[in-house]
Image (cartoon, rainbow, N blue to C red):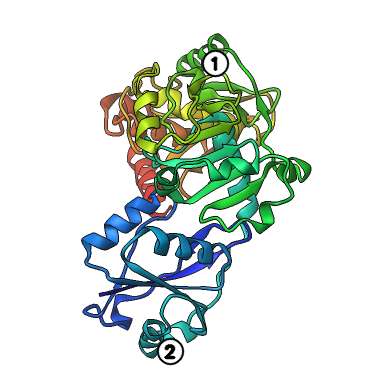
C-alpha cells in the first residue's frame, strides 16, 4: 500500500500536514496517516508505517527540509520514500510511483488552498524557551529528543545516527556561531543561535537556585500568586535543577555530552554515544517523581511575563485560592483562571486564547478544576447557582 501526506513547511522548516478527506480517495490503495510530527520520532514514523504494511510513501510538498528528510529516510529504511511538489513534479524517489499518485490526487490537490503558517516566530520563541529551561510540554514523552545543541559544526559528524532516528521529526539542531548552517543538508530543523540572538528571538530567562525555585512553587501553591516583577519568561535549566528532566534535549561540546544548558551535568565523555547508551546513563542521574505542581509553574511564569503588574493570580487545580483543597495528580487542564490588575480572565491552554470573565466564573472554574463543581459548598455560595452553572457549562462546551 502507498502512504501519502501533503506537507506544509514554514520558514523555520516545521512540517504540518494538510487534511485529506477519507471520502476523496480509495482507502484500499492509499493510506493517509495522522502521525503528529511534533511528538513522534523518525523511528516512530517508520514503525508506524511498517505496522500498516506501507511499502511506498509519497510526500507532496514545496518545502526544502523535506527533501533532506526523504533522502535520510531512504538511506536508513527499507520503505521507499518519494517526493514531489504540488504539481507532482518529481524531486526524489521513483517517478512511476509519483505518476500513479498523480492520477488519483491531482484534482483533490487542485481544490486545496494554501494555508502557510504565520506563527513561526512564536514557534521559535517557544522552542528556544523549552530548550533553555529544559521544561517541555507533557505531550513530549520522556526520551523524545526535541533539541540538540552542538558547539561547532564538525560535531555533526560525530553524533550517532540513532540519536537523529530518535529525535522528533519536528526537532532542531542548534548551532552557535557558524555561517555554514544554510548549506547543511540535515533531516532536522537547523537553527543558528547567533542569528536568534541578533534578531532578539532569545527568551528572557533568569538563573535561579533550587531554593529560590522551591520558594516560588511553595508561595504559588499556598496563594495562587506568581510574582514576576522582572518579567522573565523562563528559568534557566529549571527541569535539570529540580531533577525533573525528561531527556528531551542534548548538548554536545568538544569535551562531552551534557544534559543542561549551563554545562554542569555531564552525561558522558564519549561524543559518539548511542541513543540507548545515553538514555541508560541519564536514567542513573537523580530524578524526582512527576509532580503536576512543578510542571505547571514554568507555563505560568511565561504567561505572567506578558501581563501587566508584578503579581498575577492563577486559578489551577494545584494551588489554593477560593478553595483550599488541591489536586496532587495529573489532570488535563484546558482552562486556567487569571486575575491580573483586578481583571478576571480565562486562558485556553490549547488555543492560547484569553477570555474576559467575572469573579463568580473563576470561583466556578476552581471548583470545576478540583472536581467540586456540584458540591454543597459551592451551591451555598450563590443564590443563582443554577443560572451561573448553565452559563459556565455553555462556555466550556463552546470554547
Local crowd size for mark 2, using a 10 Å CA cut-off: few (<14), some (14–19), many (≥20): few
Residue 248 located left or right of residue 141 = right
> For residue 193, what is the image quadrant?
top right
Farthest residue toward the right? Answer: 198
The structure residue drawn at horizontal position 35% and vertical position 46%, both measured from the top left corner, is 393
Residue position marked by numbered label 2 in the rendering: 107
Contact (CB < 8 A) between labels 1 and 2? Answer: no
> For residue 120, what is the image quadrant?
bottom right
Q: Nearer the viewer, residue 285 or 109?
A: 285
Disc number placed over residue 213 in the picture, else none: 1
Secondary structure beneath label 1: helix
Residue 124 located left or right of residue 219 = right
Q: Is residue 350 above or below residue 302?
A: below
Q: Nearer the viewer, residue 67 or 198?
A: 67
Q: Nearer the viewer, residue 79 or 386?
A: 79
Q: Is residue 370 visible?
A: yes
Q: Is residue 234 above or below residue 163?
A: above
Residue 309 located left or right of residue 78 = right
Can you say which quadrant of the picture contains the N terminus? bottom left
Give the distance between the C-alpha atoms of the residues marked 1 and 2, in whole angstroms: 56 Å
Secondary structure beneath label 2: helix
Q: Is residue 318 visible?
A: no
Q: Nearer the viewer, residue 363 or 149?
A: 149
Residue 116 located left or right of residue 75 = right
Residue 167, how many percent across, how many down? 44, 46
Disc number placed over residue 97 in the picture, else none: none
Residue 370, how many percent across, how many down? 33, 29
Which of the marked residues, 1 or 2, is nearer the chain's N terminus?
A: 2
Farthest residue toward the top? Answer: 211
Residue 379, how many percent across, how many down? 31, 30
Residue 228, how many percent across, how many down? 64, 23
The structure residue drawn at horizontal position 54% and vertical position 16%, both measured from the top left corner, is 213
Amino acid at each position: 500500500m502507498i502512504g501519502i501526506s501533503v506537507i506544509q513547511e514554514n520558514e523555520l522548516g516545521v512540517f504540518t500536514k494538510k487534511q485529506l478527506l477519507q471520502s476523496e480517495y480509495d482507502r484500499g490503495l492509499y493510506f493517509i496517516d495522522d502521525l503528529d510530527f511534533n511528538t513522534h520520532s523518525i523511528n516512530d514514523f517508520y514503525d508506524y508505517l511498517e505496522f500498516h504494511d506501507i511499502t511506498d510513501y509519497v510526500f507532496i510538498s514545496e518545502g526544502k527540509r523535506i527533501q533532506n528528510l526523504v533522502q535520510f529516510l531512504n538511506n536508513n529504511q527499507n520503505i521507499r520514500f518519494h517526493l514531489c511538489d504540488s504539481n507532482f513534479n518529481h524531486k526524489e524517489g521513483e517517478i512511476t510511483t509519483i505518476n500513479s499518485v498523480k492520477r488519483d490526487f491531482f484534482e483533490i490537490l487542485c481544490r486545496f488552498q494554501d494555508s502557510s503558517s504565520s506563527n513561526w516566530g512564536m514557534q521559535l520563541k517557544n522552542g528556544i524557551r523549552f530548550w533553555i529551561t529544559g521544561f517541555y510540554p507533557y505531550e513530549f514523552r520522556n526520551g523524545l529528543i526535541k533539541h540538540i545543541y552542538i558547539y561547532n559544526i564538525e560535531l555533526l559528524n560525530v553524533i550517532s545516527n540513532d540519536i537523529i532516528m530518535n529525535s522528533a521529526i519536528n526537532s532542531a539542531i542548534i548551532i552557535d556561531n557558524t555561517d555554514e548552517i544554510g548549506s547543511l543538508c540535515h533531516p532536522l530543523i537547523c537553527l543558528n543561535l547567533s542569528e536568534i540572538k541578533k534578531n532578539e528571538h532569545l527568551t528572557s530567562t533568569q538563573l535561579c537556585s533550587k531554593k529560590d525555585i522551591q520558594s516560588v512553587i511553595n508561595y504559588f501553591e499556598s496563594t495562587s500568586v506568581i510574582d514576576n516583577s522582572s518579567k522573565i519568561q523562563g528559568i534557566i535549566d529549571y527541569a535539570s535543577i529540580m531533577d525533573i528532566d525528561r531527556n528531551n534535549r542534548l548538548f554536545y561540546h568538544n569535551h562531552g555530552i551534557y544534559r543542561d544548558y549551563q554545562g554542569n551535568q555531564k552525561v558522558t565523555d564519549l561524543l559518539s554515544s548511542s541513543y540507548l547508551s545515553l538514555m541508560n546513563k541519564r536514567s542513573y542521574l537523580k530524578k524526582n517523581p512527576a509532580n503536576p505542581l512543578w510542571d505547571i509553574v514554568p507555563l505560568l511564569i511565561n504567561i505572567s511575563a506578558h501581563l501587566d503588574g508584578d503579581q498575577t493570580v492563577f486559578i489551577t487545580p494545584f494551588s489554593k485560592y477560593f478553595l483550599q483543597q488541591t489536586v496532587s495528580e495529573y489532570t488535563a487542564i484546558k482552562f486556567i483562571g487569571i486575575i491580573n490588575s483586578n481583571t478576571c480572565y480565562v486562558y485556553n491552554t490549547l488555543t492560547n486564547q484569553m477570555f474576559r470573565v467575572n469573579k463568580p466564573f473563576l470561583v466556578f472554574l476552581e471548583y470545576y478544576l478540583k472536581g467540586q463543581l456540584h458540591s454543597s459548598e459551592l451551591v451555598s455560595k450563590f443564590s443563582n447557582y443554577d443560572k451561573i452553572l448553565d452559563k459556565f457549562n455553555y462556555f466550556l462546551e463552546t470554547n
